Image (cartoon, rainbow, N blue to C red):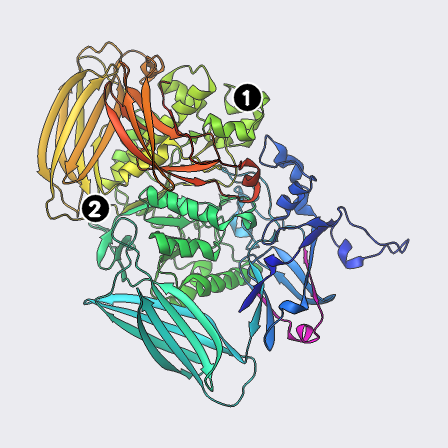
């Protein structure tokens, strides 16, 4: 049993460094009062949020105000609370902090109890003597100033901490270095002995499920009698119960389940979870309990089809089924990660599931996530690629060999392995992000740092694959050389027309674990963090606020080369998001066309930890999905239709050449499909139609049709290739846009007639709205997507689609109240009833 210290009233006070250790002035004898009064504190949380609530700093996410907050990381912060005696229970008590950021001194009743360094290693302190007095217990946690660690640019070889590095400035973040009690803390009430360090595995073979476990017994004292452990495995009211002996202070046991309900990743089946309960007893007295949920599944790692002999295995098989990876990379959800709520985590995981994602890579420059994240991945079927806390730095990317660093890294890795190895969703470990040798070749197992991590994984989690780094293999970044692209990274921007298409169409990578394209946030989001004076039609080099919020990813000139001039902020945002979606879709489709020669794609990145004008994220800081989110959802669907093409611009009379592919993941009794291809102008008039039937194959993406035609004279200087495929009750559609004049490829879209829509909204049930949308005008309506002005997050089964004149579509929209989570709290307004769904679109 535990008592959460978040129930206590915490306060925090700021000091100059070292002052709290002195207390009084040597010269005057007066008390050193500190730089703030005692402020109300959030635990878990971060000091910046508490200072903001107290009015001592402005909102660091707005304009360029984070500059005004950089002093915070250079102060010491003293937290205090009182635990009342009436909540104390049990014979023994341990004080546990799951995560303190970063260096801390802990005091109990005024006495120093512990000094600690590290974000990810829990602190456990025996406070039984203090509790035995029957008096209230005073707790103080003194957090020292942040270490001067590397940001994105620096030398990996010189890193010396296990502090999250994105805080120190990355391309998608600012410099806002978190300090605070960032994870849960509690008092654990204990008896004679307790269960610790659980390790739970599952497997599946020959229609049998296997769940095995090993748990350590930690004794408070050795009394009379003999320990025994009772284990209960339960699913849907059916229980299997066994008693296991305790040998050498460990409990080891297993269950065999005939014809079990299996756990699959999202898109491949359901996520069935069994509840395991372990009870430690002595003399028929219960000493401790442990509960967990575990899915029954097997996991294997195989070489890709046509893989070079020296390549690592990149095909992940769950229950002997090869899984084509449709993944996303994830950054921390917020700079002030201690204030992220459970509901915020759940909404992000739901967005992954809705996007048809089946793997998330937890990036090594961020954090090893809180427990709630891994539980949600188990629940929603998201495989986890977990990196240890290391990343490239640009000047050099060589894993640090400094003894102080290796010691901290080892402690962090051991803690992470113990904590998350029992989660069904955990699938692969990686040494870190973009680590290389001195010649910038991806680091291998022979590196001293990587070898240490490999040994730890093999010892503490032998069921799972350990990759030395991401990217891994002889070549780090995408290039045109054949046979050297194993797991690769890059690029992160739209490369231009036709360069983008030529590069990715020619890739022969085995796996693509990080890449992306850049896009602007919506004007609705922009207005939340930039004042009027900064919202203008200038490139980032002429707007300091744009540089502060996404300097690397400004698309102003890129978009001008495709669309020409944009006349307002709405056009600027919509053009940017269109090209982000176009560029990303092409990469994903090019990879999937080589299914199991290439075994998956992991997009950089799904989220961002602070608001950016421009970013490679699919979802902005305010959880609003960009166009690329929904176009990626389409590519990640079970049934897909796609086209290989090599440029966006054509001339009248030129031969258009495209190759159409059909992809299918899950087998059906009837795999017959009907493919329809139509070429349409910007008025919605049909130029060409073709139909073709075929039979899909789950093991590969099929080449289904060669599309060739001479381009006629088209008045509007743009045309659309519309692909549709139907199979049984499933269907999928993709539209590809091309220019056919003397101007920029998409310039004609800027002059389109305004679209006209009629929308009928119907509340289907709690949290779901059905909307019927009809195009009542004379022109196609491009990239239709719902939004609402209330404080709701929306998730759609379909969005950013196009309707031609007289066409209609029906979509379902899930709505949930926006999460109250740290600095997002002041964006949340009170909602009244069902949201009023509105439609936005390109030619509005």
> On the image, which quarter does residue 278 sit in?
bottom left
Which quadrant holds residue 209?
bottom left
Q: Residue furthest right?
A: 28
Q: Is residue 26 magenta?
A: no
The answer to whether 127 appears left or right of 483 in the picture is right
Quick check: 4 above or below 708? Answer: below
Kindly identify the residue that appears in the image at 67 percent across and 38 percent down: 57
Q: Find disc 1 in the rendering and name its residue.
A: 542
350 vs 117: above or below: above
For residue 411, above or below residue 807: below
* Picture coordinates of residue 407, whole percent (x, y): 54, 63
- Nearer the observer: mark 1 or 2; the answer is 2
Q: Find disc 2 in the rendering and name its residue.
A: 665
Residue range corresponding to the magenta coloring:
123-143
Which tag, 1 or 2, sits closer to the chain's start?
Answer: 1
Question: Is 617 positioned to the left or the right of 311 in the image?
Answer: right
At 20% from the left edge and 19% from the top edge, which residue is drawn?
Answer: 680
Q: Residue furthest bottom?
A: 224
Residue 205's spot in the image, x, y percent?
A: 22, 67
Residue 587 or residue 777, whichever sits in front: 777
Tell me the SS state at disc 2: loop
In front here: 185 or 241? 241
- Residue lying at 64% horizontally and 35% vertically, measured from the top left: 67
In the rendered structure, the answer to whether residue 300 lies left or right of residue 33 reads left
Residue 391 seen: no
- Residue 389, x across and y down, in percent: 49, 54
Question: Which image quarter is the C terminus in?
Answer: top left
């Amino acid at each position: 049993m535990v008592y959460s210290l978040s129930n206590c009233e915490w306060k925090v006070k700021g000091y100059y460094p070292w002052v709290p250790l002195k207390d009084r002035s040597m010269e005057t004898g007066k008390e050193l009062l500190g730089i703030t009064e005692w402020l109300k504190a959030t635990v878990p949380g971060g000091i910046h949020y508490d200072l903001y609530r107290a009015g001592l700093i402005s909102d660091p996410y707005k304009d360029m105000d984070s500059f005004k907050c950089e002093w915070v990381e250079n102060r010491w912060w003293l937290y205090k609370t009182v635990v009342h005696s009436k909540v104390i229970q049990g014979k023994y008590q341990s004080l546990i902090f799951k995560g303190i950021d970063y260096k801390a001194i802990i005091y109990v009743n005024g006495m120093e109890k512990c000094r600690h360094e590290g974000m990810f290693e829990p602190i456990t302190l025996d406070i039984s003597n203090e509790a035995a007095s029957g008096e209230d217990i005073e707790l103080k946690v003194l957090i020292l100033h942040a270490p001067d660690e590397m940001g994105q640019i620096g030398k990996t070889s010189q890193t010396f901490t296990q502090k999250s590095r994105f805080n120190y400035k990355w391309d998608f973040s600012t410099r806002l270095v978190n300090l605070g009690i960032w994870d849960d803390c509690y008092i654990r009430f204990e008896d004679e002995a307790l269960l610790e360090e659980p390790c739970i595995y599952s497997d599946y073979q020959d229609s049998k499920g296997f769940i095995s476990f090993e748990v350590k017994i930690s004794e408070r004292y050795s009394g009379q009698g003999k320990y025994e452990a009772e284990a209960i495995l339960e699913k849907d009211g059916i229980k299997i119960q066994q008693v296991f002996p305790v040998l050498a202070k460990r409990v080891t046991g297993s269950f065999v389940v005939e014809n079990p309900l299996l756990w699959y990743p999202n898109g491949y089946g359901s996520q069935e979870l069994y509840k395991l309960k372990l009870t430690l007893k002595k003399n028929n007295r219960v000493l401790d309990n442990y509960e967990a949920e575990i899915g029954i599944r097997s996991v294997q790692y195989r070489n890709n089809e046509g893989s070079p002999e020296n390549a690592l295995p990149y095909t992940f098989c769950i229950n002997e089924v090869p899984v084509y990876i449709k993944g996303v990379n994830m950054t921390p959800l917020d700079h002030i990660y201690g204030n992220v709520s459970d509901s915020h985590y759940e909404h992000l995981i739901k967005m992954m599931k809705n996007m048809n994602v089946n793997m998330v890579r937890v990036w090594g420059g961020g954090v090893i996530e809180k427990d709630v994240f891994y539980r949600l991945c188990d629940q929603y079927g998201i495989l986890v690629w977990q990196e240890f806390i290391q990343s490239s730095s640009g000047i050099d990317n060589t894993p640090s060999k400094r003894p102080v660093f290796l010691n901290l890294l080892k402690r962090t890795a051991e803690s992470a392995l113990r904590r998350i190895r029992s989660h069904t969703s955990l699938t692969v470990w990686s040494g870190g992000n973009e680590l290389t040798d001195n010649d910038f070749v991806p680091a291998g197992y022979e590196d001293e740092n990587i070898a240490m991590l490999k040994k730890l994984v093999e010892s503490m989690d032998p069921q799972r694959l350990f990759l030395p780094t991401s990217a891994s293999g002889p070549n780090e970044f995408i290039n045109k050389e054949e046979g050297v692209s194993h797991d690769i990274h890059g690029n992160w921007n739209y490369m231009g027309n036709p360069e983008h298409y030529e590069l990715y169409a020619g890739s022969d990578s085995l796996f693509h674990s990080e890449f992306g394209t850049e896009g602007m946030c919506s004007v609705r989001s922009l207005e939340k963090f930039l004042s009027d004076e900064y919202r203008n039609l200038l490139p980032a080099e002429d707007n300091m606020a744009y540089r502060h919020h996404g300097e690397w990813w400004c698309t102003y000139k890129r978009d001008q080369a495709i669309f020409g001039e944009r006349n307002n902020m709405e056009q600027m945002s919509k053009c940017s998001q269109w090209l982000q979606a176009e560029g990303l879709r092409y990469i994903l489709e090019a990879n999937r066309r080589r299914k199991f020669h290439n075994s998956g794609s992991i997009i950089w990145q799904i989220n961002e930890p602070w608001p950016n004008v421009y970013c490679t994220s699919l979802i902005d800081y305010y959880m609003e999905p960009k166009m690329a989110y929904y176009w990626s959802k389409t590519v990640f669907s079970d049934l897909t239709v796609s086209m290989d093409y090599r440029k966006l611009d054509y001339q009248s009379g030129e031969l258009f050449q495209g190759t159409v592919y059909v992809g299918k993941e899950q087998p059906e009794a009837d795999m017959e499909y009907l493919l329809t291809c139509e070429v349409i102008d910007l008025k919605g008039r049909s130029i060409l139609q073709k139909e073709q039937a075929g039979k899909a194959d789950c093991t590969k993406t099929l080449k289904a049709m060669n599309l060739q035609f001479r381009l006629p004279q088209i008045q509007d200087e743009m045309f659309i290739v519309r692909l549709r495929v139907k199979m049984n009750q499933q269907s999928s559609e993709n539209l590809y846009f091309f220019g056919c004049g003397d101007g920029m490829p998409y310039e004609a879209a800027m002059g389109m007639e305004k679209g006209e829509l009629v929308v009928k909204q119907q509340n289907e049930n709690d949290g779901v709205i059905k909307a019927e949308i009809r195009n009542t005008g004379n022109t196609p309506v491009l990239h239709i997507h719902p939004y609402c002005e209330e404080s709701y997050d929306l998730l759609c089964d379909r969005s950013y689609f196009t309707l031609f004149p007289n066409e209609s579509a029906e979509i379902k929209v899930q709505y949930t109240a926006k999460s109250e989570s740290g600095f997002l709290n002041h964006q949340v307004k009170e909602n009244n009833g069902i949201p009023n769904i509105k439609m936005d679109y390109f030619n509005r």
